[in-house]
Amino acid sequence: MKANNELIEIQREICDKYGLNFEPCDLNLKIGISLNIIENKYEMPIYGSRLRTENGTNGWYIYAGDYSEADDFFKPLHASHLEEICPLLLPYLGLAPGSRFLIAENGNYVDVWEDLSLLGM
């Protein structure tokens, strides 16, 4: 993984590019991630939504393919494991709660936006 300071700088640049707030993401906390990403058996696009940090999570829920309401759709994973599993996601983890991203075409298409409904607003 890139040095922590370098990663934080990249994350800040992403936030600036899309006019959104930066909030550091503790990589030692857990994210919710779909099993198909963990097992590297997914296709684009990848969707990410950040809720508030709570209960040992950093608020991120990330999945690829079709969303499911199933209780076991999201698996807990320390965010630091993304370095090995899907490093493409790391630059977007500095987006503040209330943010979403979509990555498609192997990273050649990215959309990032604010969605305050994630925070109950």
Image (cartoon, helix red, strand yellow):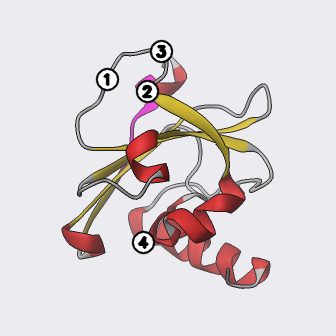
CB under 8 Å between callouts 3 and 4?
no
Residue drawn at x 49%, y 65% is 86
CB under 8 Å between callouts 1 and 2?
yes
Residue drawn at x 24%, y 43% is 65
Q: Nearer the viewer, mark 2 or mark 4?
A: 2
Instruction: Point out the tag, 1 or 2, that comes first from the N-terminus.
Output: 1
Q: Nearer the viewer, residue 79 or 120?
A: 79
Q: Residues within 10 Å of mark 2 (few under 14, many from 20)?
A: some
CB under 8 Å between callouts 3 and 2?
yes
Q: Is residue 85 left or right of residue 43?
A: right
Q: How many angstroms separate mark 3 from mark 4 (CA)?
A: 35 Å
Q: Is residue 27 visible?
A: yes
Q: Is residue 114 magenta?
A: yes
Q: Is residue 48 visible?
A: no
Which amino acid, by three-letter code, is at mark 2?
Answer: Phe
Question: What's the magenta region?
Answer: 113-117
Residue at the disc numbered 4: 17
- Secondary structure beneath label 4: helix
Q: Nearer the viewer, mark 1 or mark 4?
A: 1
Residue at the disc numbered 3: 71
Residue at the disc numbered 2: 73
Which amino acid, by three-letter code, is at mark 3?
Answer: Asp
Q: Is residue 82 left or right of residue 17?
A: right
Which amino acid, by three-letter code, is at mark 1?
Answer: Ser
Residue drawn at x 45%, y 41% is 35
Residue at the disc numbered 1: 68
Whether 48 is drawn above or below 66: the answer is below
Instruction: Point out the tag, 2 or 4, that comes first from the N-terminus.
Output: 4
